[in-house]
Image (cartoon, helix red, strand yellow):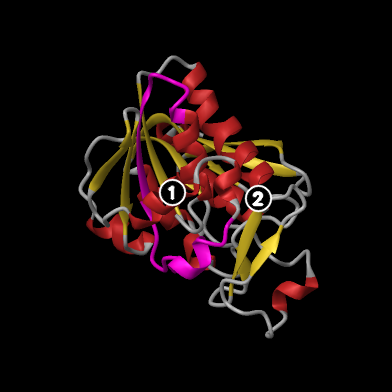
Amino acid sequence: MEAGSSNPTHSDPTHASNELVLTKDGSHTLYSARFNQWYHSLHGAFDESKRIFLELGLDYLLESGKQEIRILEMGFGTGFNALLTLLKAGQSPVAVHYTSLEAYPVPPEAYRQLNYDEFMHASVLQSLHEAVWDTDVRLSPTFTLRKVHATLQDFLANAPLGEPYDLVYYDAFAPSSQPELWTTEVFSGIGRHLQVGSLLTTYCSKSVVRRALQAAGFRVEKHPGPQGKREVVRAVWEPERSNES
């Protein structure tokens, strides 16, 4: 979920919640009046998700030879990241288990307007949004979705330490809107659900965020971003290395 500071209309109080807009790559995004943010970059929702979460995250792990990949997403939002991951999972024999957190679900009248049927049939996006909360739902032979209706803080406080996640799609709204989600404490809490070598990818490369990740136990890598974003972050969970430095 992308910050809106680069476009003055983002702070315009006349913007309606769930306003639909066509981004520069032809894919839709929505506006959240609650957080005064767009869900995706106006430079391109598809390009952003593809670069940050697929290329730097899922594709990287698929190339590593893993037979099973467990993903934790912070911010289900429009469902676009989940949709693209489902599509990618259908091209591989690797089983993908996808857990996505969302405290404020997008209503049907909003997500049904999205033009994501250009990537997969509209009924698939609908099935993602209508999947039962807090239940494992198998949507394809290689993709299982579990949506969790909770804030990240509640999830970290209550979720049992089960099988560790291999990859975190960190797609919270920007630090200017949700500063409480970009702290060392939060990233340390996420780390307890990871294993050494697990990845976290995010659009936000602000120095304060990089420092919080490093303090929590991640090794931070900066990578070229999608259109309109010079750099993005891929962080590797290496707590022992962090403690030694």
Residue 90 part of the magenta-drawn span: yes
Q: Secondary structure at mark 2?
A: helix
Q: Nearer the viewer, residue 241 or 183?
A: 183
Where in the figure is residue 61, as x and y percent of width and height? 48, 24
Count the marks: 2
Label 1 sits on a secondary structure element that is helix
- Amino acid of disc 2: Ala
Q: Earlier in the sequence, mark 1 or mark 2?
A: 2
In the rendered structure, are the residues bearing label 1 and label 2 in contact, judged by CB atoms less than 8 Å apart? no
Q: Which residue is mark 2?
A: 45
Residue type at the position of mark 1: Ser
Residue 189 horizontal side relative to residue 224, left or right: left
Which residue does the image show at 59% across and 63% down from the upper left?
175
**Spatial distance from mark 1 to mark 2, Cα to Cα?**
20 Å
- Which one is in front in this view, the residue at disc 1 or the one at disc 2? 1
- The residue lying at 42 percent from left, 57 percent from top is 185
From which residue to which does the magenta span run? 89-114
Mark 1 neighbour class, 10 Å CA radius: few under 14, some 14 to 19, many 20 or more? few
193 lies above or below 29: above
Q: Residue at x 78, y 64 (%)?
A: 6
**Considering depth in this image, is 13 or 29 the residue closer to the camera?**
29
Residue 242 in view, yes or no: no
The image quadrant where one finds the N terminus is: bottom right
Please state the horizontal and vertical placement of residue 133, each as a whole percent of the image: 27, 57
Residue 225 counted in the magenta span = no
Q: Position of residue 135 (x, y in %)?
A: 22, 50
Indicate the position of residue 120 as horizontal and vertical percent values. 52, 40
| Of the pair 22 and 52, the residue shown nearer to us | 22
Pick the front one: 219 or 156: 156
In the image, residue 87 sits, relative to residue 133, either above or below, namely above
Question: Image point 57% across, 40% down: which residue?
Answer: 119
* Residue 123 disc label: 1
